[in-house]
Image: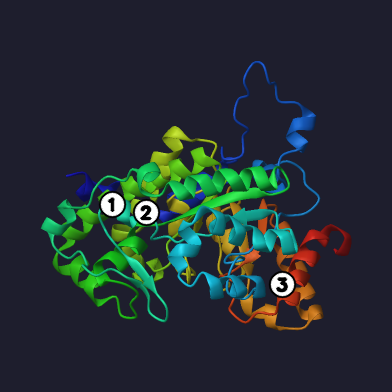
Amino acid sequence: MATSKLPHTFVSPSQGASRASRAQRSVCRPRAAAATEPVTASTTAAEPLMMRALRGDAVERPPVWMMRQAGRYMKVYQDLCKKHTTFRERSENVDLAVEVSLQPWLAFKPDGVILFSDILTPLPGMNIPFDITAGKGPVIAEPIRTMEQVKQVTKLDAEGACPFVGESLRILRNEVGNEAAVLGFVGAPFTLATYIVEGGSSKSFAHIKKMAFASPKVLHALLDKLADNVADYVRYQADAGAQVVQIFDSWASHLSPQDFDVFSGPYIKKVIDSVKASHPSLPIILYISGSGGLLERMAAANPDIISIDQSVDIVDGIKRVGSGFAIQGNMDPGVLFGSKDVIEARVLDTIRRAKSQGVRHIMNLGHGVLPGTPEENVAHYFEVARTAHERL
């Protein structure tokens, strides 16, 4: 059975870090141009800053965006929510999803515009219905906890199940042009499985841990199906216009490192390997919240960009994963509650410290921007990052 072999084919953390440090990643090599449209210096320069930076071109400053940049802290979003009261309406209606995705871009001009969506969005296309309720979050009425239920999980047809995702991405590419890169995102297999097995959000993760240690074959079968579907979903987003895709493994840090090597890492790597076989130039970011104990294992999964959270000193993190990866992060989002001087100092310190290690860097937070963050402080964060080359 393929799933039983996965943990044994997972590259060890030390191998992953050393391999990445030996050679520049292929992520950022430009795709071959058609014979009738040769790549020229002028067309290359017209590409979004993020794409040029990731490829390793000389750029005057690191690109900047922030996780959860569209959403609850913005008044324009809060006003929209009064009229469109459910998250799924806002994220699954093309006009609304595009509007919300563009709100921070119009306000702050980040270098990345990420699709407003949810990691659970493709689940109905796998025969796993879900809803998102106010005050409770995701709800899966029939959690999957047996092999018979796993067998009912279907192959994802993303265009049939969530065409609004593809249409939103196509519109976003047209709207922002080369002024910013358009990002898509997906949930990693283990994190998706936590919702599917728990029936929603969890603090203890008791059901999925019971499955992992009492019925591991069931969990591996589910993870294997999810990995195939997530890879297809990444490809769908890329084909629709996403220039970079971020994988969120939000709950992987609730596994011990040795269990990450069995239930999370191999399936992240399966997704990445599958996507790279068909889309070798697509940059893939891997983010795990609370990943301080997992950085080397993140490197072993072989993403193009490792997003480091604020629990790790960025210099230490880069030394641990090797300089062959691009690095994203990692300012504490809580800093955005501070004064403008505090924000400026921390943004510039993050950029300076990443630059000192000679890596390609995307300025970002170590986690999503927090509800209640003052919009004027977010504006200052972006202004400082956009003018960092003049301030350092």
What number is the disc on residue 378? Answer: 3
Q: Earlier in the sequence, mark 1 or mark 3?
A: 1
Q: Is residue 237 visible?
A: yes
Residue 312: percent from the left, percent from the top?
Answer: 56, 71
Q: Are marks 3 and 2 in contact (CB under 8 Å)?
A: no
Q: Give the residue type at disc 1.
A: Met
Image point (81%, 79%), residue name: 341
Circle 1 crowding by C-alpha within 10 Å: few under 14, some 14–19, many from 20: some
Q: Give the residue type at disc 2.
A: Pro
Residue 79: percent from the left, percent from the top?
Answer: 61, 74
Measure the alpha-carbon separation of dots 2 and 1: 7 Å
Measure the alpha-carbon separation of dots 3 and 2: 31 Å
Image point (16%, 59%), residue name: 218
Which residue is at the front of the view, 380 or 27? 380
Disc 2 is placed on an element classified as loop
Instruction: Please indicate whether residue 299 sits to the left or right of residue 151 in the image.
Output: right
Disc 1 is placed on an element classified as helix
Disc 3 is placed on an element classified as helix
Q: Determine which residue is flagged by label 1.
A: 126
Image quadrant where one finds the N terminus? top left
Q: Are marks 2 and 1 in contact (CB under 8 Å)?
A: yes
Q: Give the residue type at disc 3.
A: Val
Circle 3 crowding by C-alpha within 10 Å: few under 14, some 14–19, many from 20: many
Q: Earlier in the sequence, mark 3 or mark 2?
A: 2
Q: Determine which residue is flagged by label 2.
A: 122
Measure the alpha-carbon separation of dots 1 and 3: 37 Å
**225 lies above or below 350:** above
Residue 345: percent from the left, percent from the top?
Answer: 78, 74
Report the mark closest to the observer, 1 or 3. Answer: 1
